[in-house]
Structures are given as structure tokens and as C-alpha cells.
Image: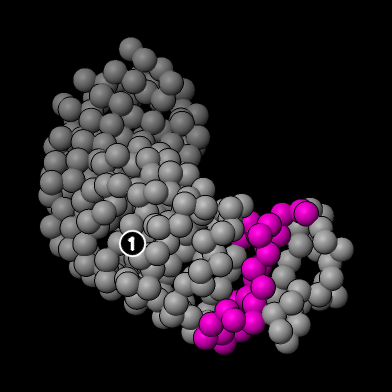
Amino acid sequence: MMGESKPEGEVFLSQSDLSPHGEKYDEGNKEEDTILDLTSCQLHDLEEVELPVQLTEIDFSANRLKLLDDRIAHLTRLKKLSLRQNLFTDDALQRLSQWPAIYALQELVLRDNRLKKIPDISKFKDLVIFDVSFNEISSLKGMSEASPVLKELYLSKNELTKIEELDHLHQLRILELGSNRLRDCISLEELYLSHNGISKMEGLSTLVNLMVLDVSSNKLTSITGIENLARLEDLWLNDNQIASLDGIDSALAGSREKLTTIYLEHNPCAKDPSYISTLRLNFPSIQQIDSNIF
């Protein structure tokens, strides 16, 4: 990245910034936050790469790394670590949980490696983004120890057969589970799918025990695919593109008697003068519509 302008307050390091012996060219000994980006450098190890103690972000994506460098254990300011698209196995990543100096990590990306199980992330109490998609993980065992402040969890393209150990993640905004082996989720009671770009609800009809469904902040234009959810109590549909309440009685026929809370604000349909009265007429047990409590 030599020759490119750098955002104020950050020093970007790339392979071209390093001497043949791994020494960083003089940057004026700046003490600002630093980001080390060595994506797609065909690295097999980090022997010739300097790891300054002030690093806050490291990206080693798309290399040939198999082992963790011990020097990472001393990067006390590290907040983001991406090891995406390398050759790390479960054994190779065990030491991550044994390095107290990096327990303040907020983002850990292990996408597209050779993992067969969830790594131990119990010590990373500030972790908000965790990505282990495109691996060979068959179980979510260990996720019960994940930080309760986790907001984004990426599990796509693995070998998962059921959803488990996620009940405590009350701040989760994004959960990606595509391309797994999920077939039977009938015990699932809460499902949060906000901010996923969903344009149509499908594949939910078998979730007969679902009580809470959050599909807010997506691209839905209508309410479909949840007619059979007879236990649904809380439904979050706000911040979508739902134009009309026409047919909402049949769209939520299964949960008509159970539904107590529904959010539809920030949809075109919420501007209808009869918006509140229509919902109260169709759902006799309703107690809350958006911020209105009855």
C-alpha cells in the first residue's frame, strides 16, 4: 500500500512495507492504531513479517498458513483477527484461547479453513463478530460459552444438522446458516433473522414450536410462509417493504389466537389510517403493536 493515501490515525502495513528481513520501513515510529493487511500474499509462515505491538487489526486472508505465530499472543491492542481462507485445523487454533493478551478481540474470522468443530471462544468476552463459515463443522457444541454480546454469527456451508446452544445470544442480529444439513428444527422456539436481505419467508412451516420470529430490517414485501405457526406470540416485521395488510388474517391464521406482539412500523402498510384497528380486530390476544401497549 506504499504510495497510497492512508486514513488519518491509521498506519496500513502490507508485505511491500517490510524489508527482506521482516523489518518495517520507517514510518516515523507512530503510535497510532495500526492495521496489518497481508491478504493474498502466498504466505506459508510469518517468519519475515513484523508484528508491531500496536496492531489493532490483522488480516491474513487467502494465504497458505497452517500454524499460529506465537507473537500474536503479545498483541494486547488487537481487536480484529482474520485468518480466512487458509489451512488451519482444529489443533492449530487451540492456542488462541490460551493467549490472555488477545482476549479483548471483537472480531474473529476463521472462514474457509479446515475446522471440524467450534473453536474455544469462551475467553473472548467482547467478541461481537464470529465467522466460521465454509468449514466442516458438524455441531454447535461450545457455542453456549460464546460471549452474550455476540451480534453477528456466520455458520454457512458447514455440516450442521441442528441448531443448538444459541439461546443466550440475545443481542444476535445476524445468523447465517445457509448450505448446512439442517432438516429438523421443530424444537426451535426463537429465531432472529433481521438484517439479512430476505425478500421472502420460506422454509419456516416446520418450526411448529416457534414462539418468537424476528425478520425485521429485511426486504419483505408481503407476509407469507408462516400460516402454520400455531404457537407464535412475538412477530417482528418492522423496517421492511410490506405494502398492505390485506390478507394478514390468512397469512397468520395459525397464530391468530396466540399472537400478543407485532411490529410493523416503518412499512408502507403502517401509514394506513386503519392500521391499528385492523390488527386489533384480527388478533384478539394482541397486547402490543409497535410501541403501543394495550
**Which residue: 50% across, 29% down?**
271
Residue 75, image x and y in percent? 59, 58
**Relative to residue 175, is residue 116 drawn left or right?**
left
In the rendered image, the vertical position of residue 257 relative to residue 221, given as above or below: above
Snapshot quadrant of residue 22: bottom right
Q: Nearer the viewer, residue 12 or 258?
A: 12
- Residue at 31% x, 35% y is 235
Quadrant assignment for the C terminus: top left
Residue beneath disc 1: 119
The quarter in which the N terminus is drawn is bottom right
Residue closest to the eye, 28 or 63 = 28
Q: How is the image coloured?
A: one colour
**Residue 91 vertical placement versus 265 (above, below):** below
**Residue 34: x, y in percent?**
71, 60
Where's residue 272, x and y in %?
A: 46, 28
Residue at x-position 18% and y-position 46%: 188
Q: Residues within 10 Å of mark 1 (few under 14, many from 20)?
A: many
What's the residue type where badge 1 is placed? Pro
Front-most of 128 and 213?
128
Residue at image position (18%, 58%) is 162
Instruction: Answer with left or right where residue 2 lies relative to residue 15.
Output: right
SS assignment at label 1: loop
Q: Is residue 233 magenta?
A: no
Whether residue 254 sits left or right of residue 221 in the image: it is left
Residue 131 percent across, percent down from the top left: 42, 61
Q: Which residues are magenta?
A: 31-57
